[in-house]
Amino acid sequence: MTKFVFVTGGVVSSLGKGIASASLAAILESRGLKVTLIKLDPYINVDPGTMSPFQHGEVFVTDDGAETDLDLGHYERFITTRMGKVNNFTTGRIYQSVLEKERRGDYLGKTVQVIPHITNEIQEYIKRGARFGEPGAADVAIVEIGGTVGDIESLPFLEAARQMSLRMGANNTAFVHLTYVPWIAAAGELKTKPTQHTVQKLREIGIQADALLCRADRAIPDDERAKISLFTNVAEWGVISMWDVNTIYKVPRMLHEQGLDGLICDKLRLNTPPANLKRWDELVYETEHPQSEVTIAMVGKYVDLSDSYKSLNEALRHAGMKNHARVKIDYVDSETITPDTVSQLAKYDAVLVPGGFGKRGIEGKICAARFARENKVPYLGICLGMQVATIEFARHVAGLKDANSTEFEPASPNPVIALITEWKDADGTIKTRDEHSDLGGTMRLGAQSSNVAKGTLAHQIYGDVVTERHRHRYEANVNYLDQLRQAGLVISALTQREQLTEIVELPQSVHPWFMGVQFHPEFKSTPWDGHPLFNAFIKAALDHQAAGNKSLKAVA
C-alpha cells in the first residue's frame, strides 16, 4: 500500500518546498523505493499554467499536456518517475469537479460543504496522483502543499491531509514542515519565534510535524535546534537544518546526513537498503570542478524573475556539466536591445532567446537574432525565440518587408507567424481554435513527434524523429515556408500530421550553429544526461569561444 509524506511550509513562501520534496524523494528512490510526487496549489485557476509568469514563475509542461507548477520540474530533475496531469492540481480544479458532480445530481440535492465534499475530493485526487491501489502504484507519494500554513487559501488542503492521516493510520503518513529561521543582523542572532508560531498553527488544526526543515542562511546551532524541538514538540533529531548552498544538487546529501530519510522510513515502517548518493556526489563534483567557462546571453522579457526560466537555467547548467564547463548566464532585458545597443552581445559566447508572450520587447529579441545571425554567434531560439528568428530572417534575408506575427500585428502584410486553427493533441484527439477562443485553453500542449530532415544540424542532434513538449498558440505560417526556404532558411523538422514547423536552422556552411525550436526542450533535461540540444548548444559556445581566442592570439 502507498504511504504518504505531506510537505508543508510556514512563515513565507519560496523557501524551497519543491527542492526539499524532490530531494527527499531522491534519497528514498536511492533506497530502492518507487516514489512519486504531487503538488497541491491553493489557486482558483484551474491550471497553474494559465497564470502570469510575473506571479507564478515558470509553467512546467508534462508529456500528457498538463500546464503545471514549476516544482514539477524539480521533481522530474531529481527522480526517474515522470510527472503528468495527476501530479498537480489546484483548489480551482477541486471546486470545479465538486460543482460538476453537484450539477449532475451526484449528491442528490444534499448540501455541499467543504467538509466532507471538498476535503474528500482532495483526498481522491491525491490517491489518483499516487495511483493508489493500482498496479504499479508508488511505495511513497510525497505530497507538497502549496501556500503557507496560517493562510486561508491552503486550509482545505491541510484539513484533507489531516483527515487522510487519521483514516490511513499513523504509520502510513508522515508530515514534514519547512520553516524559516531568520538571521537578524542588528541583533546578531537567529530568531526561532517564526518557526514556533507556524508549528503552533499546524498543531491548532490537528497536525503534528514529524520533521522540521529549518531554512536559514547558515546551519542552525545545536542549542537553537534543542529550543525549537521543545517549543514544537518535534524530537530533536527531527529538527533538521537546511542552509543556503551554491547548487541545489547538494540538498539530498545535506538532508541524508542529518537523518531525514531514516526518520521517514522509521515513521512509515519501511525496511530498505541504505541510501546510495554516489551519483549526487559525482554531480556536485562536476559542478565544482569545471575545466572551462562559457557565458550565455539570455535575451528575455522576464529577466528580473529568475523563476520564469527555471528549467532553462537548469538545462544550461546540465549541458555545462556534460561539457565539463561552468555556464554563466547573463540576463539581458530584450526591451533594452536596439540596433544601437545590440553590439553589447558581442562579448558573449552564445545567445539564447527564450519563450514569452505579448508584443513587449519583441523588436529587441529580433535585433538579438539578427546580431547572432550576421556575426556567426551560436544562437538558440526557444518557442518565441524560434518565431523571432523566423521573422528576422523573413525581413532581412527573404525580403518580406514588415514580416511579423499576427500575435503582435494582427493586420501584418506578411504574417510569417500565425494562429493555427486545427491540430492533433498528444492523446490523438483533434483540437480546433480561432482568434476568439479562450486564451487559457487553446494552446498546443504536451509531447508531439516530428520528422527530422537528414543532413541537418537537427538530425545530428536528434536523429530521425524528435519528440518534445509544447506550449504555444502561434505557429510558423505554412504559406511562407517555400519563400523562406528559397532564401536559405532550413526547415529541419515538421510535425508528422499537420506539417507544422518545429525546427528552423541555417546551413552550417553559412553559420556554425543557428537554430530555433518551437517546442520546449528544457522540460526534458536531467542533471544525469543533460539534453542533446543543450549539450550541442554549449559545445557550440565553447567552440566559438576557442575560435575567438585563437584569432586574438593570432593578432597578438
Image (cartoon, rainbow, N blue to C red):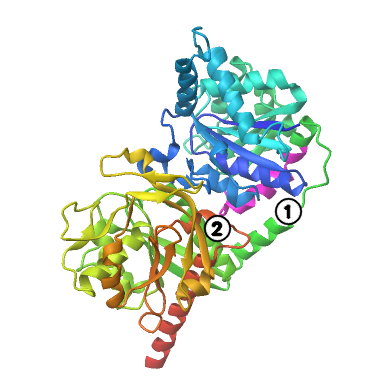
Residue found 49% across the figure and 42% down from its top: 66
**Pair 1/2: label in front:** 2
Give the image quarter of residue 488.
Answer: bottom left
For label 1, the crowd category at 10 Å Cα-Cα, with few meaning under 14, some 14 to 19 and many 20 or more, is some
Question: SS of the residue at dot 2?
Answer: loop
Residue 547's place in the image compared with 501, above or below, is: below
Residue found 15% across the figure and 53% down from its top: 411
Residue 239's place in the image compared with 204, above or below, is: below
Q: Main secondary structure of the magenta part?
A: helix
Report if residue 268 lies within the magenta region.
Answer: no
On screen, residue 494 versus residue 291, left or right, reads left
Q: Which residue is mark 1?
A: 277
What number is the disc on residue 525? 2
Point out the image quarter for the C terminus: bottom left
x, y percent for residue 378: 40, 73
For label 2, the crowd category at 10 Å Cα-Cα, with few meaning under 14, some 14 to 19 and many 20 or more, is many
**Amino acid type for the residue under numbered disc 2:** Ser
Residue 92's place in the image compared with 284, above or below, is: above
**Amino acid type for the residue under numbered disc 1:** Leu
Write down the region rendered in magenta.
Answer: 244-262
Report if residue 256 lies within the magenta region.
Answer: yes
Pick the residue in front: 217 or 260: 260
On screen, residue 467 versus residue 137, left or right, reads left
Residue found 52% across the figure and 20% down from its top: 155
